[in-house]
C-alpha cells in the first residue's frame, strides 16, 4: 500500500473510477487487495457459520462441506476476478459490457445497490445490538448512527483509506479472537473432539449451501476489487490466498470450537470472555471492514445505473454518502429485520449474472461481436437471468445459488448457440 500512496492520492478527481477502467498507475500490489478481502472473512459471522457446521455435523463432515463450498466459491470468484483485471471495470460496468447490455445492467445495478445497501443496514444493527449487550450502554439507534457515520466517512475517502482500515482491523480482530478463545480454553477443562452432531443433523448438501451462500455475492462482485490488480496471476494469488486462509481458517476455528465445547454459540461465548476494551474491539473490527465494502459496492452499482438513466455526473463519493445515510437510517428504525427476507432472495438473484458474464466473456466475446452485443443477445441474457433466478427459488434440492448460476449459464449458452445457427 505504501507504494500506492506514493503515486496515488485520495482526490476528488479520481473518485475510484466507477465508470472508467482503472489506469495502470493506480494498480495495487496483490497483497494489498488480499488484506482487504481477508478482512471480509475475519468476522464473527464467519466464526458462527463454522460453529454451526461443527455443532450440526461433526468434525470431518463439516470440514468436507467447508472445503467443497470454498472450491465452489473459488470457481466463481477467480473468473469474475480475471474479468475485472482484464477490463479494469467495476462489476456493474462489466455486466453492461458483457452479456446483459445497458438496460439489463441497469436492473442488475438496482438489485445490487439495494441488496448490498440492505446488508450494510443489517450489519450496523447487529453491531449496535452487540455493543448494547456487551456494555449495557444504549440506545441501539445511537450506536447504529455512530457506526454508519464512521464507515461512510471512510468509504467516502476511497479504496486507499479502506486499505489502511483493513491493515489495522484485521490484525486487531485476529488478536481479539485468539484472546477470547484462550480465555475460553483456560476457563474449562479441554475435552476430546467427538465426531457426531450435537444438534439437529445437517446434511452435506445443506452445509455446502450455507458455506456458498455466506459469500456468493462477494464472489460475484470480485471485479470491484480485482480491477485494481496488475495482472491475472495476481488475481489468482489473492483469491486463493484469501478464500483458503480466510474462509477455511476462520470457519475452521468455529468448527473446532463447536466440537470442543459442544456448543454452536461461539459469538456469545467470545463476548462473555472478552470484557472492556477487548470486547469492544472484537465487535468493532468484525463490523467495519465488511460494512465499508457494502457501501462501496452499492455506490459503484448505483452510479452505473444512474449513468444509464442519463445522470452522468453523479460521483461515487456522493453516492457513498447516500447509501450510507439510507442504510444507517434503516438500521436506526429497525427496518432491517423486515428487509432480511428480501436479502435472502437476492442470494439467488445475483449468482445467475456471474454465469452469464463468465460464458459471454470467455467464450462468446472471444468469437467476435460488438462491445455491448446485439439487442437480441441482451434479451437472451436477461431471460436467462430471470429463468436462473426462478430455478434458484423453485428447485428444492441442491444449492440455490449454484442452481440459479448454472441454469442461467446453460440457457444463455444454448440461446446464443441456437441464434448463431439460425443466422
Image: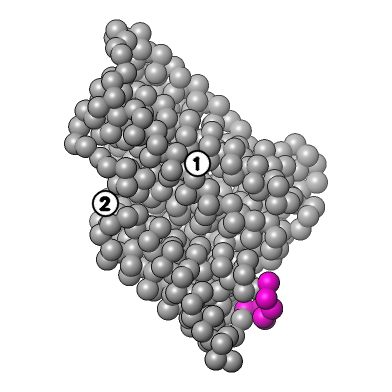
Q: Would you say the magenta stretch is mainly helix, strand or loop? A: loop
Q: Is residue 45 visible?
A: no
Q: What residue sits right under mark 1 in the picture? A: 40
Quarter location, residue 59: top left
Q: Position of residue 250 (x, y in %)?
A: 45, 31
Which mark is in front, 1 or 2?
1
Q: Quadrant of the N terminus?
A: top right
Which residue is pictured at 37% across the width and 24% down the height? 256
Which residue is pictured at 36% across the width and 30% down the height? 60
- Answer with left or right where residue 391 lies relative to residue 173: left
Instruction: Please state the extent of the stretch shown in magenta in the rendering.
Output: 366-372
Q: Quadrant of the C terminus?
A: bottom right
Q: Secondary structure at mark 1?
A: helix
Q: Are marks 1 and 2 in contact (CB under 8 Å)?
A: no
Q: Position of residue 50 (x, y in %)?
A: 36, 34
| Residue 368 sits inside the magenta stretch | yes
Check the image and report above or below for 320 versus 260. Answer: below
Calculate the distance from the C-alpha at mark 1 to the C-alpha at mark 2. 22 Å
Q: Position of residue 85 (x, y in %)?
A: 68, 56
Q: Position of residue 409 (x, y in %)?
A: 48, 68
Q: Which mark is residue 336?
A: none
Instruction: Give whichever of 222, 380 is nearer the camera.
Output: 380
| Mark 1 or mark 2, earlier in chain | 1
Q: Which mark is residue 337?
A: 2
| Residue 163 sits inside the magenta stretch | no
Q: Is residue 196 visible?
A: yes
Amino acid at each position: 500500500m505504501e507504494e500506492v500512496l506514493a503515486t496515488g492520492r485520495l482526490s476528488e478527481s479520481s473518485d475510484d473510477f466507477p465508470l472508467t477502467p482503472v489506469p495502470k498507475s493506480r494498480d495495487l500490489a496483490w497483497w494489498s487487495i488480499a488484506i482487504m478481502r481477508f478482512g471480509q472473512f475475519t468476522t464473527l459471522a464467519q466464526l458462527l457459520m463454522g460453529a454451526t457446521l461443527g455443532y450440526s455435523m461433526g468434525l470431518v463432515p463439516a470440514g468436507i462441506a467447508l472445503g467443497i463450498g470454498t472450491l465452489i466459491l473459488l470457481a466463481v470468484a477467480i473468473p469474475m476476478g480475471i474479468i475485472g483485471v482484464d477490463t479494469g471495470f467495476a462489476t456493474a460496468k462489466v455486466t453492461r459490457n458483457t452479456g446483459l447490455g445497458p438496460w439489463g445492467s441497469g436492473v442488475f445495478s438496482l438489485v445490487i445497490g439495494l441488496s448490498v445497501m440492505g446488508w450494510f443496514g443489517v450489519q450496523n444493527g447487529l453491531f449496535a445490538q452487540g455493543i448494547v449487550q456487551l456494555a449495557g450502554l444504549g440506545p441501539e439507534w445511537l450506536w447504529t448512527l455512530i457506526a454508519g457515520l464512521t464507515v461512510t466517512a471512510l468509504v467516502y475517502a476511497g479504496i486507499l483509506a479502506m486499505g489502511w482500515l483493513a491493515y489495522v482491523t484485521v490484525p486487531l480482530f485476529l488478536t481479539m479472537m485468539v484472546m477470547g478463545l484462550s480465555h475460553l480454553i483456560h476457563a474449562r477443562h479441554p475435552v476430546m473432539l467427538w465426531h457426531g452432531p450435537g444438534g439437529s443433523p445437517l446434511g452435506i448438501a445443506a452445509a455446502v449451501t450455507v458455506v456458498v451462500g455466506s459469500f456468493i455475492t462477494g464472489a460475484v462482485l470480485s471485479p470491484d476489487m480485482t480491477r485494481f490488480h496488475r495482472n491475472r496471476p495476481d488475481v489468482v494469488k489473492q483469491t486463493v490466498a484469501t478464500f483458503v486462509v480466510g474462509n477455511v481458517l476462520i470457519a475452521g476455528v468455529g468448527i473446532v470450537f463447536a466440537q470442543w465445547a459442544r456448543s454452536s454459540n461461539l459469538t456469545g461465548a467470545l463476548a462473555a470472555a472478552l470484557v472492556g476494551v477487548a470486547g469492544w474491539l472484537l465487535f468493532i473490527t468484525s463490523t467495519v471492514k465488511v460494512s465499508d465494502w457494502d457501501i462501496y459496492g452499492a455506490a459503484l452499482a448505483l452510479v452505473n445505473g444512474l449513468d444509464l438513466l442519463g445522470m452522468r455526473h453523479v460521483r461515487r463519493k456522493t453516492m457513498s454518502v447516500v447509501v450510507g445515510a439510507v442504510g444507517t437510517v434503516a438500521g436506526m428504525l429497525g427496518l432491517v429485520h423486515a428487509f432480511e427476507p428480501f436479502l435472502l432472495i437476492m442470494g439467488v438473484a445475483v449468482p445467475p449474472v456471474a454465469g452469464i458474464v463468465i460464458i459471454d466473456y470467455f467464450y462468446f466475446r472471444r468469437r467476435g461481436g460488438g462491445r455491448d452485443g446485439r439487442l437480441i443477445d441482451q434479451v437472451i441474457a436477461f431471460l436467462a437471468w430471470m429463468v436462473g433466478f426462478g430455478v434458484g427459488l423453485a428447485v428444492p434440492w441442491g444449492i440455490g445459488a449454484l442452481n440459479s448460476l448454472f441454469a442461467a449459464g446453460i440457457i444463455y449458452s444454448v440461446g446464443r448457440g441456437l441464434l448463431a445457427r439460425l443466422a
